[in-house]
Amino acid sequence: MTETLIEAEVRGVPRPDISHLTTEDDTHVDNLFSERQMRLLTDSLYNSWVGPGEGRTFVAMANVGLFFAPHEDALVPDVLVSLDVKLPSDVWLKHNRSYFIWEYTKPPDVVIEIVSNRKGKELSEKLTDYGRLGIAYYVVYDPEQQISSQPLHVYERRRTTYSEAPEAWLDDLRLGLTLWQGNYEGIDAIWLRWCDQNDQILLTGEEAARQERQRAEQERQRADQQQQRAEQEQQRAERLAAQLRALGIEPEL
């Protein structure tokens, strides 16, 4: 078995020199929808997904460099998800600031691109690049259908190339993707959402909190209704007792 770079470092072999690599350049400009769409996908995973199986971990990142070789420029997917890995304890160290495949010892399992213009080459060059890295699933969401007549493409890697999947179900993650019409942080739109096998969307932290507040309010209302019914029954019993006493009959307790 080929030794990983992490295993080599444990033996005393240093990491590759990455001092020349740019992990963030502060030049990326995106639109409001894309910015929220990225956060929606990561937020809902961290707040509503326990992972692909018991005891298994994952990381989800948005707009973070994906480095596959020390002397190659990064790819920057809008969203990536990687199974069975953990975030490093110190994210400020240079070798922890991005997704370096040699540090995590594996490529991500999913990358998602959100089309915002016609220049991104999501269905050509990026399709080839991500497939070359061995990423199991590649997803392209084109909300305005700028590069395709359909808004959602899900590709699954088979052997060495991608094939477009007939449905938006990512079996390795036991998760699906769906298009959802609704309001997220003040924007009404059609959003790309994660869903389970029952087509229930994964909730964001705010959605989960709102749902819990609604549940608590419903419980309070039910408790109030029960209290009102109990008081009405008590009043009815007291009226009946008074009527019986008026007739000279002492009611049984």
Image (cartoon, helix red, strand yellow):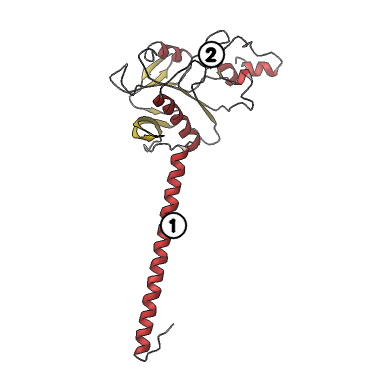
Instruction: Tell me which corner region of the image, top left, top right, bottom left or bottom right, holds residue 34.
Output: top left
Do the residues bearing badges 2 and 1 touch, measured as CB atoms within 8 Å? no
Where residue 83 appears, as percent x and y from the top left, is 52, 27
Q: Amino acid at mark 1?
A: Arg
Above or below, 177 against 146 in this view is: below
Q: CA distance from mark 2 to mark 1?
A: 54 Å
Total tally of numbered discs in the picture: 2
- Name the residue at 39% across, 26% down: 33
Q: Is residue 107 left or right of residue 164?
A: right
Which quadrant of the figure contains the N terminus? top right
Where residue 188 appears, as percent x and y from the top left, is 34, 33
Where residue 84 appears, as percent x and y from the top left, is 55, 28
The mark found on residue 121 in the picture is none
- Name the residue at 47% across, 30% down: 42
State the SS at label 1.
Answer: helix
Which quadrant of the figure contains the C terminus? bottom left
Q: Nearer the viewer, residue 228 or 155?
A: 228
Q: Residue furthest right?
A: 12
State the SS at label 2.
Answer: loop
Q: Nearer the viewer, residue 22 or 109?
A: 22
Residue that label 2 marks: 68
- Name the residue at 44% across, 57% down: 220
Where residue 134 appears, as percent x and y from the top left, is 48, 16
Of badges 2 and 1, nearer the viewer stands: 1
Q: Residues within 10 Å of mark 2 (few under 14, many from 20)?
A: some
* Of pointers 2 and 1, the one earlier in the residue sequence: 2
Residue that label 1 marks: 220
